[in-house]
Amino acid sequence: MSNSSWDRRRGAVAVGYDEAGNSPQVLAQGYGEFAERIIAQARAHDIYVHDAPELVGLLMQLNPDDYIPEHVKEVLVELLMWLKDVADDDTSGEDL
């Protein structure tokens, strides 16, 4: 498989919290068909799905069950807060 084919494959990473709710961790990750299954399962359970290839690439460097490193967690939290604000603005009927 060429690098360009590999780069175009869709990836997905499921992120959640451990049972104690202490820190986010990688729950599942994969490329291609497995990524599509992760996304489908998330949507089937009304779990937010965000398409961010750069973030997926960063999180793919971790292993399942790994906790998200603090510096990555900060970026993830900022992104999710921004997305929530955008979604709130969108549902209020205001133009962006």
Image (cartoon, rainbow, N blue to C red):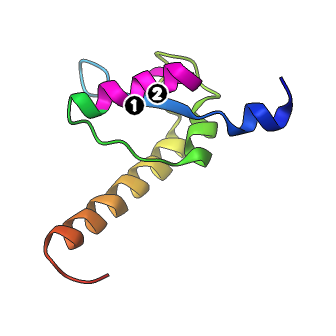
- For the point 56% across and 44% down, the residue is 55
Q: In the rendered view, tell whether residue 76 sits above or below residue 88.
A: above
Q: Position of residue 73 (x, y in %)?
A: 46, 43
The span picked out in magenta is 24-42
- For the point 50% across and 16% down, the residue is 64
- For the point 36% across and 53% down, the residue is 80
Quick check: can you spot residue 26? no
Q: Position of residue 74 (x, y in %)?
A: 46, 49
Q: Residue 36 has which mark?
A: 2
Q: Residue furthest left?
A: 92
Quick check: can you spot residue 96? yes
- For the point 26% across and 84% down, the residue is 95
- CA distance separating discs 1 and 2: 5 Å
> Quick check: is 36 in the magenta stretch?
yes
The quadrant holding residue 47 is top left
Q: Residue 39 has which mark?
A: 1
In this image, 33 relative to 16: left or right?
A: right
In this image, 14 relative to 84: left or right?
A: right
Q: Position of residue 2 (x, y in %)?
A: 86, 29
For label 2, the SS is helix
All told, the count of numbered labels is 2
- Say which of 35 and 75 sits in front: 35
The quadrant holding residue 45 is top left
**Amino acid residing under circle 2:** Glu
**Amino acid residing under circle 1:** Ile
Q: Position of residue 88 (x, y in %)?
A: 20, 66
Image quadrant in which the N terminus is located: top right
The answer to whether mark 1 and mark 2 are in CB contact below 8 A is: yes
Q: Residue furthest right?
A: 2
Q: In the rendered view, tell whether residue 64 sits above or below residue 82.
A: above
- Say which of 84 and 70 sits in front: 84
For label 1, the SS is helix
